Image (tube, rainbow, N blue to C red):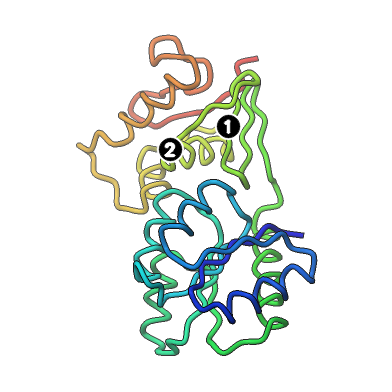
């Protein structure tokens, strides 16, 4: 099934969720505080996170933004706040689903399964191989010539987007909108900086490219060097 990480400070709710999800075959881990939860998410790279909002050390909305800075893991908000405006704000901040307390273990497990189905149907490709480059879209891990190569969030997002458009010249405006979620600024050097970092990790330079080829005045193309 899936690996699920729960961040919930209420002992009874946490135990209910853990038991219900484990009984359905999921691998479940849980923490009662925001910072312990964040570290656990980083360490275990779960398939789904269930996040309470009323945490003792940090508001769950703030933790959601911290998670989104490092990971695209699907997040289900578990909250007693049923205000529509609050729910919309959280969904716009990066949550994928929400469940309002009190909820049953069966409802929570159904929400997890439904979310995973949506993700699977939205992108059946789990990994992309280009020459000696292996990109795992689910775990957000990259290997170059068989060597694991750590990348930050934007480096991975940039590489993954180019890989899903293999061989095509992707305009810089499209990259900026898709990866940075902002309108493109013609004088902005963000893309150039991240491309430079990415090339270094791929073992190439702009002058001697292997994978990343710049088409001057148009955009960037990822190619198979073989």
Residue at left 72%, top 82%? Answer: 106
| Along the line of sight, the residue nearer the viewer: 53 or 198 | 53
In this image, 38 relative to 109: left or right?
A: left
Query: Above or below — where is 196 with respect to 93?
Result: above
Q: Tell me where residue 37 appears, x and y as whole percent.
A: 48, 59
Residue at left 57%, top 24%? Answer: 223
Circle 2 residues within 10 Å: few <14, some 14–19, many ≥20? some
Disc 2 marks which residue?
Answer: 152
The quarter holding residue 74 reads: bottom right
| Along the line of sight, the residue nearer the viewer: 207 or 93 | 93
The quarter holding residue 92 reads: bottom left
Task: Give the structural element (helix, strand or loop) at label 1.
Answer: strand
Query: Above or below — where is 221 with respect to 17?
Result: above
Residue at left 35%, top 71%? Answer: 59
| Along the line of sight, the residue nearer the viewer: 142 or 214 | 142
Q: Tell me where residue 93 appears, x and y as whole percent.
A: 39, 66
| Along the line of sight, the residue nearer the viewer: 180 or 37 | 37
The N terminus, quarter of image:
bottom right
Q: How many marks?
A: 2
- C-alpha span from label 1 to label 2: 11 Å
Tell me if label 1 and label 2 are in contact, CB under 8 Å: no
In this image, 119 relative to 184: left or right?
A: right
Task: Give the structural element (helix, strand or loop) at label 2.
Answer: loop
Q: Tell me where residue 193 appears, x and y as whole percent.
A: 31, 29
Query: Above or below — where is 2 with respect to 153?
Result: below
Residue at left 57%, top 42%? Answer: 140
| Mark closest to the chain's N terminus, 1 or 2 | 1
Disc 1 marks which residue?
Answer: 142
Circle 1 residues within 10 Å: few <14, some 14–19, many ≥20? many
């Amino acid at each position: 099934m899936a690996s699920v990480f729960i961040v919930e400070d209420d002992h009874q709710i946490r135990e209910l969720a853990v038991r219900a999800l484990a009984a359905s075959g999921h691998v479940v881990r849980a923490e009662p505080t925001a910072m312990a939860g964040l570290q656990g998410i980083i360490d275990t790279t779960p398939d789904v996170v269930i996040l309470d909002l009323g945490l003792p050390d940090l508001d769950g909305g703030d933790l959601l933004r911290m998670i989104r800075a490092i990971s695209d893991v699907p997040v289900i908000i578990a909250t007693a706040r049923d205000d529509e405006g609050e729910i919309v704000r959280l969904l716009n901040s990066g949550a994928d689903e929400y469940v309002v307390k009190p909820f049953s273990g069966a409802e929570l497990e159904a929400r997890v399964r439904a979310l995973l189905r949506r993700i699977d149907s939205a992108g059946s490709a789990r990994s992309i191989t280009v020459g000696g480059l292996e990109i795992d879209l689910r775990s957000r891990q990259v290997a170059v010539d068989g060597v694991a190569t750590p990348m930050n969030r934007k480096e991975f997002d940039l590489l993954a987007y180019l890989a899903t458009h293999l061989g095509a010249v992707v305009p810089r405006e499209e990259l900026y909108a898709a990866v940075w979620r902002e309108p493109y600024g013609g004088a902005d050097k963000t893309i150039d900086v991240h491309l430079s970092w990415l090339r270094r990790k791929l073992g190439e330079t702009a002058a001697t490219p292997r994978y990343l080829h710049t088409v001057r005045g148009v955009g960037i193309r990822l190619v198979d060097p073989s």
